[in-house]
Image: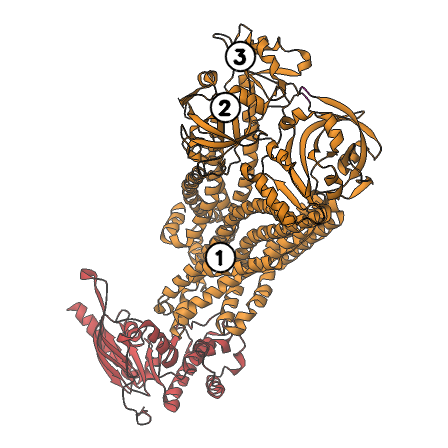
Amino acid sequence: MADHSHGADTRPIAVASGLTKVYGKGEAAVHALAGVDVELRRGQLTAVMGPSGSGKSTLMHCMAGLDTPTSGTAWLDGENLTEMSERALTAMRRTRVGFIFQAFNLIPTLTAEENITLPLELAHAKVDRAWFAQIVEALGIGSRLRHRPSELSGGQQQRVACARAMVTRPAIIFGDEPTGNLDTAATRSLLEFLRHSVDELGQSMVVVTHDPVTAAFADRVLFLEDGKIVTDLADPTEASVLGVLQASSVAAAAGRAG
Amino acid sequence: MLRVAWRDVRHHPVRFVMSVLAVALGVAFVSGTFALRAMLASTFDGIVETSLDGDAYVVADNGVAYSPDWMSDLSDQGMVPDSLVPAIEALDEVAWAVADYTGPVLLVGADGTRVSTGAGGAPSLGMVVDEAVITNQGFEIAGRTPSGQAEVVLEAQTAEKAGLGVGDTTTIVVGGDAPREVMVTGIMSATDGTPFAGAVLVGVDRETAKAAFAPTGAVGMIVVRAADGISQDDLAQAVSTTLPSEANATVKTGATLRSEALASIDDNLGFISMILMVFAVIALFVGAFIIANTFAMVVRQRLRETAVLRSVGASRRQVFGSFVAQAGIVGIIGSAAGIAGGFGLVTAIRAVFEATGMPLSGAIPVTVLGVVVPVVLGVVVSMVAAALPARRASRIAPVEAMRPDGQDTQRGLAVRGSVGTAMTLGGVGLLVVAHRAGDDGGAALGAGAGLLLVGLIVVSPVLAPAITRVLGAPFAVLSTPFGALAQRNLGRNKRRTANTAAALMIGMTLVGATTVIASSATASVDDLISTQLDVDFVLDAGWTPIPGGAIDALQGLEGAAFMAAGGTPGTLASEDSSQRAFFVGVLDGDLEVMSRGFMPPVVDGSIQGFTDGIAVAEPLATRLGLRAGDTFALTLAKNTPVEATVELPVQLVFSSEAIDTDVMIAGETFDSVIPAQARPQLVAAWQAFVIVDPGVDPDAVRAQLVDIVAPYHTISVMDRDEFSSFLSDQVQQVLNILYALIALSLIVAVLGVVNTLALSVVERTQEIGMMRAVGMSRGQLRWTMVIEGVLVALLGAVLGIGAGVGVASVIPSVAASTGLGVLSISWPAVASLFAGAIVVGVLAAVWPAVRAARVPVLQALVYE
């Protein structure tokens, strides 16, 4: 897949500079992030992969302003997250960041439509009905809007969550294993939608995953190990992703053997 | 399984904080009540031991058990003549014998105001103090005994309260005498240090006391001391031989009299502690809702864990036992804290009593009953409250362990709804029956109120969503999306929301009912006074009689007529029965005041020209079959030297709740029945009424009245409106005590709201994190919690105030004959209750809201 960048804005959407995150102290200290430097480009879908405990979720949390790094700086859409107050971070999340979670995380008491418009209501912003209709149409959930989450399938719930992430026209969307709880068909249709919103709408997106199929839909894949980026793969395919994973597991096995 | 139960409590202490607190509060109140009762009993025991330390007592032979005279209105005891003393004293078995000259005394302190007896209603008494009393009755004195009218000694605590010492001069009012200047010649105290529970004790010499308290020679008792080596029984035997049969006197040994006095005190304390206990039990009942809610949540959260336990072989009984054991742990911890709290409470009460001049004796008693009963109560309530959720837990199938959780299966409410509706409607029906039945509706009222309340508790989960929708509508419209979010959060677990509100409802019902009773009582008093009493001023001395000196001074009143009314117990003898009754007569003043100023509804006869004969209240007249024109026999001043039985003509039969007496005696008849000299002792003047002459300025009369009563310190001059609010205030004071007691169950209910909100924070951690991740600010989150708290509180308020006002509205129909005949609902007061509920909701939400705001955003992304 070729270069999908749109427009004249070539500044990176998110930057991590010397990010470290240490849990615990002394002997028991765990370095979840051991100095990460990366720039994420605008209008791209970036996948973050790595084995459990490699720090991929921590990296995403720090770059999204959900977690505070121990040292280093995270920039999001030109703003320094590490210097922001809780209030400013809340405003940031509300207006410029969208989230999609593995566990869907819809509010059980609200209908699908209410869940989608919730971020706008929290910000006391008007719902752009045309934009809303466009997203709903693209996600194919128009007929399910009046249903409660418990009345929707997993795929439908995740698409509602997607719509909720998109509705504020965020600068960037973070997805934490968004396909983790979905079957193959639902995974495929969700990924197609994500790809579509990056290609057609210029949406910037970061997705943490350990599914090579999901990663293959990205423009770029970052591989983390022990809190560091070990491989930066552009225009991945399922085969190239598997290749990197195999190489690293061989290296890990070799490391253990040696 | 017990280990699992214990670990869970240890690892999730926050879940149980409110349950423990609720149990602790209830238990504290129960144990505090026990301790308070024991402490008061030991204080009064001490007083009885000190003040009644004779070996034998000569008292009136009327079969009435002795009770200390500060506990009965006017002495029911009857009297014996002090002329019996010389014969008794002459006996070999007797060391000394004295007539007990005691009576009311008003003491003015160094600051020029009356020395108060404190909150406990202790008496202000004058007694004889001479050398014989000091040596024989266990007192010691600093200074010397009084001699003559111008000298007194004071009991040590009285002197301290009064700010008076030996050599100081002050003013006293003894019995019905005019105020006079006296000098303090000594300070006395009980040798064994017994405190007198705030009583004001003034010692005077024997002649002064006799002149003031026993002008006819009739006394309440004669105290006898045995000579060395004589037993109480032998002494009583010997004394009884000296008593002439016409004296109507009998001998009781010291032990008998003391045990009668203690029994009567114990009855009174028992009544007080029973009322306290009722409120303590209500608080525990309310607390049970919190525990039930907590365990319902614990059971749901541990669904998976329980299923795992079941699949590894735990039996249903073991699962059930595990949860109930957990409740037991909560109960034990709560009860232990409650016992400590109870002692703290009593210590505080004692400090308050002491500060208001009523020191209580001894250490706080630790009785087995006072510790075991509250603990057992606390633990049992906890376990019973947890039993239902535990039963649900025990029914969890092992296969649940394999299923993904999170699906909230709400059991149907159809059965609960219909049973609750039936009970509620039944309760309302009974209230209607009570309303129609009038005086006989008491039982229906009680049953209806109970059924209504239980019915509402049962049906509340069905009603809750609709009511919260209505109550929440303003929030939903004005505060999108938070109002709607809060509303739906409450709708998520109907049972829990309803249980929380029901706990609050119980307290709110009591408050609502009390509020209506308060406003109805005020309205009823206003109504009675405006329709039945047409006088310009009323003089009243609170709970003490108006001194005779003040009434004498009223004779000089210019431009107005007055009448002093007083009462005494007597015996009414009809052909086939005798009946004790309370009599009121005109003691002094213008008889016209009665027929002009009193307008009781007359059933038979006429009040015009009521200067002779008697007026009988309708209930008594009905019982005895009396009509105007009949005559019947009446015995007054029984067991006194002036005892008289007279045939009296019935002038009228009246029906009035305003005149709280069985018989009114017209002035001339009263004069012939009780000689003037015996009046001050036998008949207390409770009130005086004044009618201003036409054309005279009432303010001028008032100024005269104020001058007349000023030296007596206790008498207030009130016009009709003031008298009306004075009577209402007395009702209000009783109701204020009720409010304070109800507050306990309200506090526990507020803990319940805190508990429910805090539990929902625990349950919704992930959801809250998600809300925050999509941009909800901490302030918005807190605001949502506050709306939830307010909505729950309002739900409880709507149900409770509705039920309370409904039940109380029936009371005037049932209780009209006791003077509470006018229904008045004070809507501002009801509105302020709702305002109070909103405040309660906000306060209850503070802690849970802070906790919710602290939930890290990352919680949404971390899943187990």
Up-down relation of residue B36 to residue A104 (above or below): above
> Which residue is denoted by mark 1 in the rendering?
B753
Badge nearest the viewer, 1 or 2: 2
Label 2 CA crowd tier, 10 Å (few <14, some 14–19, many 20+): many
Q: Nearer the viewer, residue B160 or A236?
A: B160
**Labels 3 and 2: the sequence-earlier one:** 2
Q: Nearer the viewer, residue B730 or B710?
A: B710
Query: Do labels 3 and 2 touch, CB within 8 Å?
Result: no
The colour with which the image depicts chain B is orange
Up-down relation of residue A210 to residue B850 (above or below): below
Q: Amino acid at mark 2?
A: Val
**Labels 3 and 1: the sequence-earlier one:** 3
Do the residues marked 3 and 1 share a common chain? Answer: yes
Name which quarter of the figure residue B605 lies in. Answer: top right
Task: Report the residue at 44% width, 34% height from top.
Answer: B162
Up-down relation of residue B846 to residue B364 (above or below): below
Q: CA distance from mark 3 to mark 2?
A: 29 Å
| Secondary structure found at label 3 | helix
The colour with which the image depicts chain A is red
A119 horizontally vs B713: left or right: left
Tell me if I can see residue B381 in this picture: yes
Give the label on residue A108, or none. none
Q: CA distance from mark 1 to mark 2?
A: 60 Å
> Which residue is denoted by mark 2 in the rendering?
B204
| Secondary structure found at label 2 | strand
Residue B414: x percent and y percent? Answer: 63, 59
